[in-house]
Image: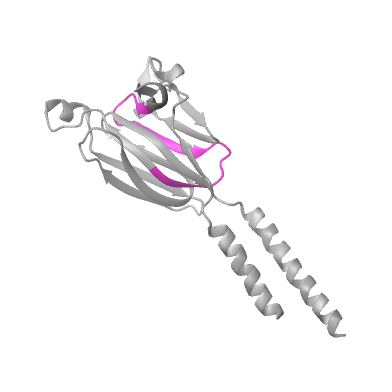
């Protein structure tokens, strides 16, 4: 086989491998019910990801609040589901990997506490949610999603790649669940794969030359 063609094939294989969707991890908060149904926590760690809330920068007796994530469960048995929510208005919830590595944020389920157009909705709900994203290259971006004012979780596809962190803020209460994430292949792993492919190409070329000689 022509060495150049083999090298191109190797690079194509590497590119294809890198572009394949990594296994999706769902941060679903179902393990939180025992600890946060009646008591707020500072953060939640699940499947190598950590979710925090900044408590809107509020202080108690001069000290910053730290425990502002709570949970709510519905259903029972196989139909039981637990969602997380922020305990203070204008607080920012954030998502990152525990090890600080890059990740992809595929989607998130959101629901407001009151889903109608009445007085209670204006007091307890915010139908416009602002997201902020920080990328591995040092850049950042924002995205706004709008809830449909209907009861039940609504899935928003974010499709954000190569993130170091993501956050979202609501001026009032907000339920969130099923944070779909996937890992980003480490550069070192890709480099090793490329070296292995290059070595294979060289070996085949050398073998081909030997047979000709």
Residue 197, position as x, y percentages in the image: 70, 65
Whether residue 101 can be seen here: yes
The quarter in which the N terminus is drawn is bottom right
**Image point (67%, 79%), residue name:** 4
Q: Quadrant of residue 166?
A: top left
Farthest-out residue, left: 118
Q: Quadrant of residue 89?
A: top left
Farthest-out residue, bottom: 213
Farthest-out residue, right: 213
Farthest-out residue, front: 78
Drawn side of residue 34 relative to residue 3, left or right: left
Q: Nearer the viewer, residue 140 or 129?
A: 129
Q: Point out the stretch of residues depicted in magenta.
A: 83-107
Q: Is residue 87 magenta?
A: yes
Whether residue 170 can be seen here: no
Name the colouring of the figure.
one colour
Q: Is residue 66 magenta?
A: no
**Image point (51%, 31%), residue name:** 46
Residue 211, position as x, y percentages in the image: 85, 81
The quarter in which the C terminus is drawn is bottom right
What secondary structure predominates along the stretch shown in magenta?
strand
Q: Is residue 127 above or below residue 158?
A: above
Drawn side of residue 42 relative to residue 169, left or right: right
Q: Nearer the viewer, residue 124 or 201?
A: 201
**Image point (45%, 33%), residue name:** 51
Q: Quadrant of residue 91?
A: top left
Residue 30, position as x, y percentages in the image: 44, 27
**Image point (39%, 40%), residue name:** 167
Drawn side of residue 196 relative to residue 97, left or right: right
Residue 55, position as x, y percentages in the image: 37, 26
């Amino acid at each position: 086989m022509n060495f150049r063609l083999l090298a191109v094939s190797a690079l194509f294989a590497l590119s294809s491998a890198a572009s394949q969707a990594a296994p999706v991890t769902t941060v679903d908060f179902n393990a939180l019910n025992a600890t946060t149904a009646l008591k707020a926590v500072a953060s939640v760690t699940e499947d190598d990801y950590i979710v925090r809330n900044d408590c809107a920068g509020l202080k108690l007796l001069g000290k910053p609040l730290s425990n502002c994530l709570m949970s709510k469960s519905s259903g029972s048995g196989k139909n039981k589901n637990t969602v997380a929510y922020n305990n203070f208005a204008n607080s920012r919830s954030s998502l990152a990997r525990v090890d600080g590595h890059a990740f992809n944020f595929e989607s998130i389920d959101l629901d407001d506490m009151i889903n109608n157009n009445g007085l209670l909705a204006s007091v307890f709900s915010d139908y416009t949610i602002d997201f902020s994203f920080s990328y591995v290259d040092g850049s950042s971006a924002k995205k706004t999603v709008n809830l449909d004012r209907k009861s039940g979780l609504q899935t928003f596809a974010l499709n954000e790649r190569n993130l170091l962190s993501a956050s979202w803020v609501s001026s009032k209460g907000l339920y969130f669940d099923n944070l779909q994430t996937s890992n980003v292949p480490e550069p070192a792993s890709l480099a090793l794969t490329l070296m292995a492919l290059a070595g294979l190409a060289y070996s085949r070329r050398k073998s081909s030359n030997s047979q000709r000689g």
